[in-house]
Amino acid sequence: MPQYHLIYFDARGRGELSRWLLEYGEIPYTEERISFGDWSVRKQTVPTGKVPILMIDGQPLAQSLAIARYLAKEVGLMPKDHLQAAFADALADSIAEMMAAFYKNKMSSLAEDEKEKKFHEEITPTIIRPLLGDLNERLAGRSWYASDQMSWVDLMIAVEFGGLRKSYPKLLDDFPEVAAHVDKAMALPSIKAWINRRPDTFI
């Protein structure tokens, strides 16, 4: 088995899905958590100058979704049917776009009250709720998103919407199918164990 070393900030963020996949597959790995204050210096020595990076036997793999797709194949969570895999990819891209808007606002120089106002008045109604509506409809009467088997994007749903719900507890109140889906993924034994022991970070 390859040796895995994950390099990311001391945060959930774009590195958390990779952690979930590694934990789900019970794959041994090490990680380096970089503080935001140390990033300007550490950036100079990180391959590509961006994180997350997954070092695989010393070889750097960049881009969070590329890392997730690689790990999904390693742990058996990539749909075998090409169309089902494409459905998973499409949702993953949509969620990534949503989270990019969220992080751009969260890490901006705006005052905290302005960030919250933008989140509630712009990002939530125009980006988050439309995606939640489509997702809630898709999940109705289904066990998992892409097929009758769990795939990596089911974990991504729980990582991202579970993370948002942590900060905004009422976010999923109008979307019971999504809320139940998040709870189901979080209850998986290896995932539950990880959630219980992971560092408590603000994002």
Image (spheres, rainbow, N blue to C red):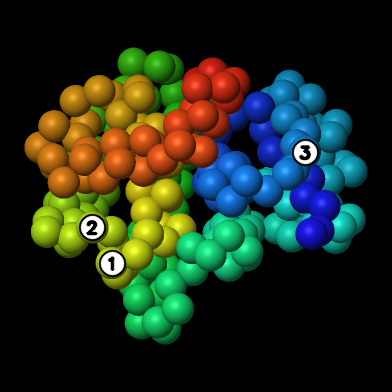
Q: CA distance from mark 2 to mark 3?
A: 32 Å
Q: How many labels, in total?
A: 3
Packing grade of label 1 (10 A; few <14, some 14-19, many >=20) is few
**Which numbered disc, 1 or 2, marks the residue that appears first in the sequence?**
2
Above or below: residue 13 compared with residue 165: below
Secondary element under disc 3, as helix, strand or loop, is strand
Please tell me whether residue 164 is drawn above or below residue 18 in the rendered image. Answer: above
Mark in the foreground, 2 or 3: 2
User: Which quadrant: the N terminus?
Assistant: bottom right
Q: Quadrant of residue 56?
A: bottom right
Q: Position of residue 11 (x, y in %)?
A: 59, 29
Label 2 residue SS: loop
Residue 38 position by quadrant: top right
Q: Report the residue marked by disc 1.
A: 148
Instruction: Please indicate whether residue 46 sits to the left or right of residue 203 in the image.
Output: right
Q: Which mark is on residue 143? A: 2
Amino acid identity at mark 1: Asp
Q: Is residue 14 visible?
A: no
Question: Where does the image place residue 57, in percent across and percent down from the top left?
Answer: 86, 57
Q: Which residue is mark 3?
A: 30
**Residue 83 in sight:** yes
Q: Which mark is residue 170?
A: none
Is disc 1 in contact with disc 3, using a CB cutoff of under 8 Å? no
Query: What residue is drawn where x is 21% and y is 40%?
Result: 180
Q: Counting residues from the N terminus, which is met first, the one under dot 1 or under dot 3? A: 3
Real-space CA distance between mark 1 and mark 3, rounded to the nearest whole angstrom: 32 Å
Q: Secondary structure at mark 1?
A: loop
- Return the x and y of residue 101 as percentages of the image width and height: 40, 44
Q: Residues within 10 Å of mark 3 (few under 14, many from 20)?
A: few
